[in-house]
Amino acid sequence: MSRVPIVAIIGRPNTGKSTLFNRLIGRRKALVSSVAGTTRDHVMQRVQGRKMDYLLLDTGGIGGGSTDKNFEDDVSAQSLVALEAADVILFTVNSREELTSSDFAIVDMLRTRKRAHVSILLVATKCDNIDEAEAKIPEYWSLGIADEVIAISSVHRIGTDELEEKIIEHLKRLHFEAPVPDNLQPALTPPRVAIIGKPNVGKSSILNALMSDPQRERSARLVSDIPGTTRDSTDVIIRFEDREYIFVDTAGLRHKAKVEEDLETLSAIKALQAVEDSDIVVLVLDATAVISRQDKRIAKLAIEEGKGIVIVLNKSDLLTHAERKEKEEETLAAFPYCRFAPLLHVSALTREGLNKLFPHIDTVDRNRKRRISTKELLSWYEGIVLKAPVKELASSKFITQADAIPPTFVLFTKHPERIDVSQLRFLENNMRTTFAFEGTPIRWITKER
């Protein structure tokens, strides 16, 4: 599986970056407001298409103009880091206004900070009147910074199709390829496993312990007690019992309030990118530390992206048997939304439990790709709804699996709006009892029959 490219939207505040972001991803995710500087932090979303998948990154405005001066410098610094991670840059300017000193400052910054091979598409936004917009295009070309100049109106979907085609065109020039559908990939393709977690929980130590001695001599991961030692994501192929696994060691994900250096911001982007690229996520926790909000955030990220998940409690050699049981209970209580994830005690120092990681990965990999026949599903559902406490489930007459990776089921019912989360959770719990699905999230779609 090749790396998923990053497309970053860069511009001064209030040039329509978030509106463009929402248009390209096809739904309203980024916060949109007429107040300059609304987006303070990165918003990233995978854009899936027939020709190419890419990660679209919305950034805060650069160059001033925000009403929140306390955050302005920090937002600009994060946007600069996003620029350096991007494979294609969308530079937005407001076509309804004259170019400002902030726009020219961004032009100078793009000349000096972007990587040489990266294309810049200058996007003139808010072009409701195409004739007026086209009159300004020569001025935009004269900046001498753009590979393409495209006039758009995100609200009215003017020019956005052309913009999407240009994004794909420039990514292909960098030799990025269209993704191979999971059901068409060779059955023996090694699963990609991203090792994620907070800084200093032992991710690199675990990867080192999994390597063979020759591998460790050639490419051992740098290990230190200083949080943030790993700055990038690195692939390592590990062979266990005649099967290969691609492990991706990632930088630790910190809470944004604790990300103070540009390199750490870039590391967080790379870690999120590694999660997107992966099939399975191994969430590493420090068994001797209290589970934090950031640990929970990382787990939710993996589940939202439909990844398989294994939870690893590292440094368990420092716990007694009773303390291990207590830690398991604490972990299950902290992650109620992923109780289906295998839980494993390991020690990177003594290598205890590490060989058990591979059978868990194999199980999760199989379950992510499982398909249940419609006949089996209907038989299971008929037996379940007889015990269902909600009549609306009994009125549903058909269920089928729409997709795998992650397993996605469609429930047809007369009144989809009456099926709430608790009812779907009831179905999921029973489904996991019958069909297992250990380690993989399950998604539900309700449709009117």
Image: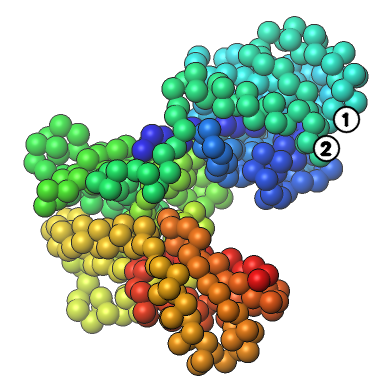
Q: Which residue is mark 2?
A: 156
Q: Is residue 329 left or right of residue 45?
A: left
Q: Secondary structure at mark 2?
A: loop
Please give the name of the residue rendered at 43% of the width and 81% of the height, measured from the top-left corner.
380
Q: Residue furthest left?
A: 213
- What amino acid is labelled 2 in the image? His
CA gap between label 2 and label 1 equals: 7 Å
- What amino acid is labelled 1 in the image? Asp
Q: Is residue 332 visible?
A: no
Q: Nearer the viewer, residue 275 or 291?
A: 275
Please give the name of the residue rendered at 52% of the width and 87% of the height, measured from the top-left corner.
385
Q: Nearer the viewer, residue 299 or 179?
A: 179
Residue 410, numbered circle: none
Q: Residues within 10 Å of mark 1 (few under 14, many from 20)?
A: some
| Residue 232 screen position, x and y as percent | 38, 36
Q: Is residue 91 left or right of residue 232?
A: right
Q: Residues within 10 Å of mark 2 (few under 14, many from 20)?
A: few
Q: Is residue 39 left or right of residue 136?
A: left
- Asked if 394 appears above or below 55 in the picture, the reply is below
Q: Quadrant of residue 390?
A: bottom right
Please give the name of the residue rendered at 30% of the width and 60% of the height, measured from the top-left corner.
366
Q: Secondary structure at mark 1?
A: loop
Residue 128, numbered circle: 1
Of the two numbered discs 2 and 1 on the same chain, state the one appearing first in sequence: 1
